[in-house]
Amino acid sequence: MTAADAALPSTPEPVFFPDLVPELLVGDLAVSLSFWVELCGFEVLYDRPDDGFAYLRAGTAHLMLEQVGIGRNWIPAALERPLGRGINFQIMMPNIAPLLERLAAVDWPLFMSAETRWYDTGDTQAGVAQFLVQDPDGYLVRFSSRVSAEG
């Protein structure tokens, strides 16, 4: 690299947008952003504050947050806590330990303690370290990291 190359502005890495992105209705966007960004390590790719909306990502995991009562909400039935009953969102991370430490530091309760499990995947098995936690609105999130057969 020459000095001239160093002076050139870097080209931002293109953002991959997956074909399926859940949009979670939340009671308070600021509270949800504190959980998802400050604790869980997501970043805000863009937001629309006047609509109570934020688009987040962590690695290739994407999600949208939308505050109820602001902007255009699509609500098919009464919202009762915990929200998202019957679903859990699995989010793969390189390592769940730092997230567990951040959650413990603020006494955030876990829905299920950390464990290592092996799941059948056809002719092979996949190992994951995982735990479950609920976000401020009660959505159930399973954070996982891959575990190799060697340990």
Image (cartoon, rainbow, N blue to C red):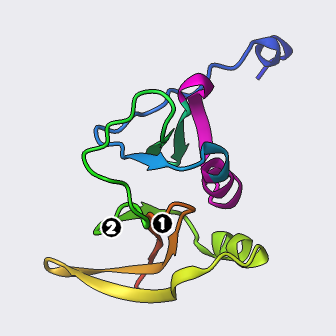
Image x and y of residue 5, in percent = 76, 15
Q: Is residue 94 magenta?
A: no
Q: Quadrant of residue 127?
A: bottom left
Q: Describe residue 80's horizontal placement relative to residue 50 as left or right.
A: left
Going by the numbered disc 1, the residue's amino acid type is Gly
Q: Which residue is pictured at 51% across the width and 32% down the height?
A: 70
Q: Residue furthest front?
A: 78
Going by the numbered disc 2, the residue's amino acid type is Arg
Answer with mark 2 or mark 1, whichever residue precedes in sequence.
Answer: 2
Q: Residue furthest right?
A: 3
Q: Which residue is pictured at 36% across the width and 61% down the height?
A: 84
Q: Pointer 2: what residue?
A: 85
Give the magenta-colored segment's residue range: 32-51
Q: Pointer 1: what residue?
A: 138
> Quick one: label 1, few (<14), some, or many (20+) residues within 10 Å?
some
Q: Which residue is pictured at 64% across the width and 58% down the height?
A: 35
- For residue 98, the mark is none
Seen from the viewer's position, the closer of residues 51 and 145 is: 51
Q: Are marks 2 and 1 in contact (CB under 8 Å)?
A: yes
Image x and y of residue 80, in percent = 39, 62
Q: Which residue is pictured at 31% across the width and 65% down the height?
A: 87
Q: Quadrant of the N terminus?
A: top right
Say if 63 sits above or below 131 in the image.
above
Seen from the viewer's position, the closer of residues 48 and 16 is: 48
Q: Describe residue 71's horizontal placement relative to residue 45 as left or right.
A: left
Say if 94 sits above or below 107 in the image.
above
